[in-house]
Amino acid sequence: METTASPARAGFPLLLTAACATVPLAFCLSPVQVLAAAAGTLAGAVARHVLTRTRHGPRASPLHCELPTGLLWTVIASLWQWGVVATPWLAVLLPLTWVAVPLVVTDLHHRRLPRVLTVALGVLALPLLSVPALVEGWPLLANAVLGGAFTWALHAAAHRLSPASLGRGDVLLAAPTGAVQAASGPHALLLGTLLASVITVLLHLARRRPGHWRSGIPHAPGVLAATTLVTLLHAPLA
């Protein structure tokens, strides 16, 4: 039975948005970082709105979407401002983290990945990667295509062998995340694959109770976290 949200609860997202915009000012962050925090919080609110209207989408709170997205965008903007992340890669990192947060939330809650988000990421991956390819050369896209195909084939084979441990959503997600990782080079794809496996193992060890995640350990959080970290580390060096 659904209950009507109280005025305090209904106003919480607005208060959180204001907090994300004002807290950085207290630490004397730059206008770029403040703008990134505010934009990320707004983007997280949009993602949560979409997530709650998808099939099997959890009733996420602002702490699940707005806050993580705002923090991630602030970190990315900071690294860009400090010259660690090249400007063209912002076109990849910002949309990637925007979609990654609701995907992680859903996988952790329900062991499902909303198809609308995985398909959107799959469709947009190569167009987004074409932005850094314009600067760094078109072989970047060739690496992305090969890497995406390789990781998709690997996950498809694993799904065929054990459908309960690796779902179709994970297979759909493998192509765009593999493409993003491989765009930074084969070494980045290898590192991303190993890092995703490590994170998945850590999730297995961190299970709150034996019956938790009975349908298998969530794999998307590790893949998406590894893809983001690998891209942050290797994109400027590609």
Image (tube, rainbow, N blue to C red):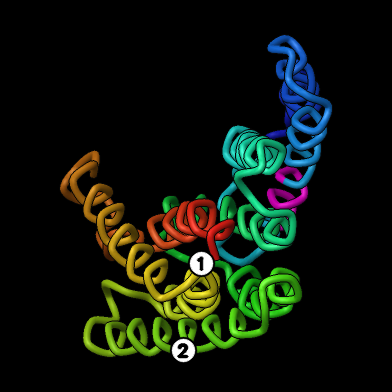
Label 2: element kind = helix
> Marks 2 and 1: in contact by CB < 8 Å?
no
Q: Is residue 77 visible?
A: yes
Using the image as rendered, state which of residue 41 and residue 116 is in the foreground: 41
Q: Give residue 101's position: percent from left, percent from top.
A: 57, 50
In the rendered structure, the answer to whether residue 139 lies left or right of residue 213 reads right
Where residue 215 sits in the image (x, y, percent)?
28, 65
- The C terminus, quarter of image: bottom right
Q: Is residue 45 magenta?
A: yes
Please name the amino acid that badge 1 sits on.
Answer: Leu
Q: Which of the 4 image quarters holds residue 213? A: bottom left
Mark 2 crowdedness (10 Å alpha carbons): few <14, some 14-19, many ≥20: some
User: Above or below — where is 140 with respect to 161?
Assistant: above
Q: Which residue is mark 1?
A: 113
Q: Is residue 230 above or below residue 113?
A: above
27 and 217: which one is in front? 27
Q: In the image, is residue 37 part of the stretch drawn in magenta?
A: no
Residue 100 percent location from the top left of the image: 57, 56
Q: Residue at x 40, y 87 (%)?
A: 150
In screen coordinates, is 62 left or right of 144? Answer: right
**Which residue is at 66% across, 42% downward?**
83
Q: Main secondary structure of the magenta part?
A: helix
Q: Amino acid at mark 2?
A: Ala
**Is there any visible trace of residue 61 in the rendered image?**
no
Task: Give the magenta-colored segment's residue range.
Answer: 44-50
Vertical arrangement, residue 40 with respect to residue 21, above or below: below
The residue that label 2 is drawn on is 149
Identify the residue shown where x is 72% and y is 38%. Answer: 81
The Cα–Cα distance between marks 1 and 2, rounded to whole angstroms, is 20 Å
Nearer-the-camera pick, 55 or 69: 69
Label 1 Cα crowd, 10 Å radius (few <14 / some 14-19 / many 20+): many
